[in-house]
Image (cartoon, coloured by chain):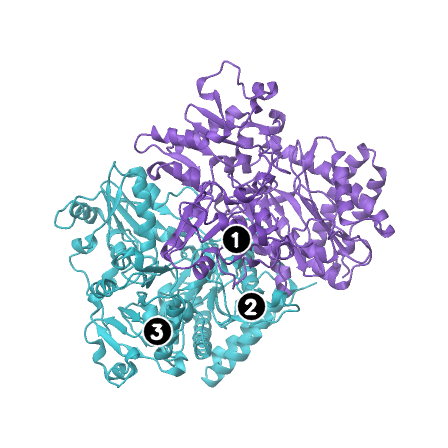
Chain colours: A cyan, B purple
Amino acid sequence: MSPKITTELLRQLRQVMKSSRYVAEPIQAYIVPSGDAHQSEYIAPCDCRRAFISGFDGSAGTAIITEQKAAMWTDGRYFLQAAQQMDSNWTLMKMGLKDTPTQEDWLVSVLPEGSKVGVDPFIIPADQWKRMSKALKSAGHVLVPVKENLIDAICVDRPQRPCKPLMTLDLSYTGIGWKEKIAALRAKMVERKVLWLVVTALDEVAWLFNLRGSDVEYNPVFFAYAVIGTDTIRLFVSGDRMADPSTREHLLLDSALEAEFKIQVVPYESVLTELQAICMGLSPKEKVWLSDKASYALTEAIPKAHRYLTPYTPICIAKAVKNRAETEGMRRAHIKDAVALCELFNWLEKEVPKGSVTEISAADKAEEFRSQQNGFVDLSFATISSTGPNGAIIHYKPVPETNRALSGNEIYLLDSGAQYKDGTTDVTRTMHFGTPSAYEKECFTYVLKGHIAVSAAIFPNGTKGHLLDSFARSALWDCGLDYLHGTGHGVGCFLNVHEGPCGISYKTFADEPLEAGMIVSDEPGYYEDESFGIRIENVVLVIPAKTKYNFSNRGSLTFEPLTLVPIQTKMISIPLLTQKECDWVNDYHRKCREVIGAELKSQGRHEALQWLIRETEPITKMH
Amino acid sequence: MSPKITTELLRQLRQVMKSSRYVAEPIQAYIVPSGDAHQSEYIAPCDCRRAFISGFDGSAGTAIITEQKAAMWTDGRYFLQAAQQMDSNWTLMKMGLKDTPTQEDWLVSVLPEGSKVGVDPFIIPADQWKRMSKALKSAGHVLVPVKENLIDAICVDRPQRPCKPLMTLDLSYTGIGWKEKIAALRAKMVERKVLWLVVTALDEVAWLFNLRGSDVEYNPVFFAYAVIGTDTIRLFVSGDRMADPSTREHLLLDSALEAEFKIQVVPYESVLTELQAICMGLSPKEKVWLSDKASYALTEAIPKAHRYLTPYTPICIAKAVKNRAETEGMRRAHIKDAVALCELFNWLEKEVPKGSVTEISAADKAEEFRSQQNGFVDLSFATISSTGPNGAIIHYKPVPETNRALSGNEIYLLDSGAQYKDGTTDVTRTMHFGTPSAYEKECFTYVLKGHIAVSAAIFPNGTKGHLLDSFARSALWDCGLDYLHGTGHGVGCFLNVHEGPCGISYKTFADEPLEAGMIVSDEPGYYEDESFGIRIENVVLVIPAKTKYNFSNRGSLTFEPLTLVPIQTKMISIPLLTQKECDWVNDYHRKCREVIGAELKSQGRHEALQWLIRETEPITKMH
C-alpha cells in the first residue's frame, strides 16, 4: 500500500484557510473530523473528507492541519493502516498510548498566540466542539465555525450526495409499527417534559419509520432527519424519495389519518431553518430534545435555555433492545450466514493448497456464498480477509497492492458479515490450513479463553458492558499479552453493524447497562505486528440467566451466541483450557452441528455439511 | 439503635432558612453535604453537621431539607445504618439503586416554582456545586451560597475546631524531605504552566510537609491549607501550632534558607482573603492550580480565567505512589498489626465459648493488642466488630444498644486497622467460632475466590482499577449474588485509610491508572440482610509482574499482600476452589507463618504463635 501524496492538497487547503472567500479572518488550524452531518461511522463518498485530505480511509480518525503541520488521531485498530496510507506530511497520533497528546493539548503546543481554529459546524459533534472550544479558549485561542467546508472547497470532483430508493419493512420484520414507535417515543417525551425531539442519526430515522435505504455502503440507511413534536412529525428527505407508491402507502402519506400521525415531508437541506423556526415559537421552559453528539450547528440552533441534551435519544435505547420479531430475524440471518461460511471454509480447505486463493478472492467467494442466501441485501462492512502479517492490521481491507495468497504456512483471519432483510451479521474466524506453530496455538487459546469468559459470563441486571471487558483479557494478561481494541459493540437488526448505546469495552463512555434483548459482539483478539492476527468473534444476544440465588431480586443476565460457525479446534492448545472451557466448546459445536447442519441439509449442501460435522467433533482434555 | 428525634431541629432549621439574619431571601431547600471545608471523609466533631441534623453518622451521606421534606442520600454500605439512625421525618435515598432519584432530580420534583436552594459554599465541592447549580437553573430554580452555616446557627453547643500538637516525620519514614517534595511539585507546576497551587486536602498538606496531626479522629491530619508559589510557600494553620521547637526546626522556620523554601505561616482563617489578594495581583494568563473537588468558596475566589482545575493535584498523585521508605514502613506496620490480630483471634477462640465477649469488648481487645505494638498511634477508623445480623450492616459500629455477644452460632466479622508511625493498616477477617453452615461456607468461598482473583490478577501497566472490579464479583455473580460496595480503596502511609486517586470499583470516577508502589485494599464481601456479613480484606501493594511475554514492552503489574493474617480455612468449602486457588491460600498462609511467626516468636507471644501455626495448615483439594 503506497501512501497518498498530499503535499499539493495541503498547500491548497492552507491557502483557503487564509482566503477571505471562505473565512472572515485567516485560521491557523483546520479540524477535519471523521463523520458526516449525522455523525455516522460509515460515510458516503461525498463525506470522505478526512480520507481525501490525508489518504487514511479507516473508519475512525480526526485530522488537524495547521500552517506548518498535519496530524492524524486514530485508535489501535488503525495504527498500521494509517502509517501505511499517509505520506511524510502527516504525523500519526496513536490514541490510547500514554505519551500521545490529545488534539487540544497538541493544538495548544503548536499554535501561535491568539490563534483561530476552524471546523465545519455541521460535522463536529456538539460535545466535541464544547471540549475543544473550552481547551482552546483557556489557552488564549478560539474555535470558529467555518460554514463552507474547506475540504469541499479544494475538492474538484466531489461526488453527489446519494439519494437511492427506500425499502419498507413490515411487521414480520420490525415487530412494531412506526405509529406505535412514535407513540412510545412521545410517552418518553412527556416523561421528560420535552415538546420536540430532533432525530439526527441515520439509523435512528430508519428504525423509527421502519424504512431502510442504501445511501451509505454497508449500512442500510438513507440521508434524513426527523423532528417529532407532540402532535406533528416532520421527515426531512431529499428529492423524490417519497414518490414511490409503496413508501407512500407504508408511511400512510395519502391516507386519512389522526393529525398527530400525519407525516410532513420536508426537504433534507431545510432542517436547520425549520429547527430555527420551531425554536422561535417556543415559550419559556419549552424544551427540545437532542443527542449531545448531534452536530454543533443543530445544537446551536436551539437556544441554550430550550436545549435538552442527553448522551442517547430514547430511540437509540429502544432500538438497542430487540423485540421478538427482531431477535428471530437475527437468528435466521445468522443461520444463513453460517451456511455461507461453512461453504466458504470447506471451499478454502480444498483450494488453498493449490495456491490460487488470495485474500481478495477469498473475500469475494465469501460474498458469493452469502449472496446465495435468501434475503441477502449487502455486506455489513468491508470484509477483513487477511493472512499472515496482514492479520496484524486490525481493520485491514485487502487491496491489489497488499493482496496476499492464502497458504498452509500462515494464519488466516476472516472478519465479515452481511445485511439480510432479517438481520445483520458480523463474525470473525481465525483458521490455519496447515500446521499452526505451538506459539500460534497458545495465543489462539488465550483469545478463545477470553471469548468464552465473556460469552459464558453471568452478571446482574443493570451491569454496564465495560465491567465485562477484562474477562476477555484475563488469560492474555496473565502472559503479558493484550489487544488494543474494545471487546464488543452493539449490533443493529438489519441496520448498522456498529450501534450504541451498549458495548463491551475498557472505554467507559457510551455504555448503557446491558438488558435482555440487546445484541453485542464478543471479539477478543491478539495481534503480533508483522506476523499474524487472531480474533474470535460471535454476535451474542443478552438473555436472562438462571442462577442458584437471586440477590435483591435483581435477576441475572448472560449471553446466547447467535453466530453458529465452528471455531477451528486445530488451533486450540487443549491443555490450556479448563474442563469448563472444553465443555463450552463442545456444547457450542453441538449446537452448530444441530442448527446449521439441519439448514445445510435442507439447502442440499452436502459437502459443507460433511465439513461442519468434521469441524464440530468434540475435543477431549486429557487428565 | 434508636433513631434521633429530629422534629424540633428540623423546625428550627426551617425557621432560619427563612430568617433575614442568615439569608437575604428565604430559601426553600438547604443542602447539608457530608464533608468539611477540606472535603474530608472523616471529620471533626465541629463539622458533623449532617449527623447533627439527621442522626445518621456514617462516613458518606448528603442531607437535603425542604420546607416539607427531609431526605438523605447514602450508598449501599449505609442503607441499614441510615434507616436505623433516622426518624420518620427522613426519607432514605438509596444511591446506586435504579429507581433512586438524584439529588437534583428530586429537588426539581419537590420544589415550588422559582425556588432558592442554599448551601454552605465552604463545604460543597466546586464540581458538585456546578452540577447542582446547572440542574436547578435549567428547571427554573437557583442555587445560592449561604455564608453562615445554618446547621451551626441552630446548634447551641457546637464543639470548637481542634488544634492539637503536630508530629514531625523524619526521612526514615518519609523517604523524601519536604523541600524535595516542594521542588518536585514546582517542576510539575512549570510543566503545566501554572504559577500557584492551592492545597486544600488535609492529607495532602500533611504529606507535603512531612507533618502529622490528630485533629480528626483516626486520620493523622491537622487543619491547614497551603498555597505554593514558584518562590513562596504559605502554610495556613491556627493558633500556636508553630510554637513547638521541633516543628519549627523541622520546617526550618528559624534557619537561614533559600528564599523559595522559606515558609510563611499564616492564620488558618485567612486563606480566602489571602487567595483573593494573590488573584488580584495576577497578570492575564497566569494560572492557579486547584483540585476540582475543592470548595466552591475557594474556587470562586479565583477568577475563571485564572483557574486551572484538575480532578487531582500533583500532590495527590505523588502521594499515592509510595517510595521505598514508605513501602518498608507499611510492611512493618502490617507485621505488627498481624501480631495483634493473631493475639486477638487466639484470645477470642478461648473466650467466645464462655459467652462473655461482645462486639464492643472484642473491638476493645483488638485495640488493646494493637496499642501494645511499637509506634502505635491510633486506630485508622472506627472498628467494625459485628456478629450475626449486625454483620450485614456494612459499616456497622457497635454501640451499647446494638451490642451483641459473640457465639459459636454466628459469623463474626472484624474490619479494623491502626495508624502506626510506620504506616496505616486496614484488614477484615470473617470467622466462625463454632460450625458454619454449608450456605455460610459457600458464600464465604465465593468471596474468597473474588479476593484471590483480584490479588493474583496480572494486568498491564496503565490499567485503571475499575477494570479489575468484576474479577472480585465473578464467582458471586455466577450464583446470582453480589455486594453493593466497591472492591478496594487507596490506603495512605500513616495517613488517611481511604485516599485517592486510585481504587478498585465499578464506579469509574476517581480512578487514576494503577502503578507500581500504589497501595489499595482488596475487599470483596457478601451480605445477607438480617442474617450475616462476610468480607475478606487485605491491603495490597502494586508490584511489577513477571510474565512469559511482554506486549508492546508495556510491562505488567500484580499485587503483593501486605496484610498477613490467616484466612479462616474452616469457613472454606474446599471443593469450590480450583487447584490454583488452593495453592494461593497455601502460599499465602506459608508467608503468614514465616513472617508473622518470626515476629510472634521474637515478641515472645508463644500461644498466639501456636494459634498461627494451626490456622495456617495447608488445605488439600480431593481429586
**Residue at (45, 84) in percent of width and height:** A603
Q: Determine whether A112 is above or below A616 in the image.
A: above
Please name which of the two marks, 2 or 3, marks the residue nearer to the observer. 3
Task: Find disc 1 in the rendering and name its residue.
Answer: B507
> Which x, y percent locates residue A347?
44, 73
* Mark 2 to mark 1 CA distance (whole Å): 21 Å
Front position in the image: A489 or B122: B122
Which quarter of the figure is the N terminus of chain B placed in? Answer: bottom right
- Chain ID, mark 3: A
Report the amino acid beneath label 2: Thr
Viewer can see residue A306: yes
Tag 3, which secondary structure? helix
Is any atom of residue A84 visible in this view?
no
Q: Which residue is mark 3?
A: A208
Left or right: B452 as drawn, with respect to A613: right
Residue A548, horizontal then vertical, whole percent:
66, 69
State the residue position of label 2.
A558
Give residue A36's quadrant in the image: bottom left
In-front residue for pair A45/B472 = B472
Quarter assignment of residue A497 = bottom left
Q: Earlier in the sequence, mark 2 or mark 3?
A: 3
Say if labels 3 and 1 share a chain. no
| Residue toward you, B247 or A403 | B247
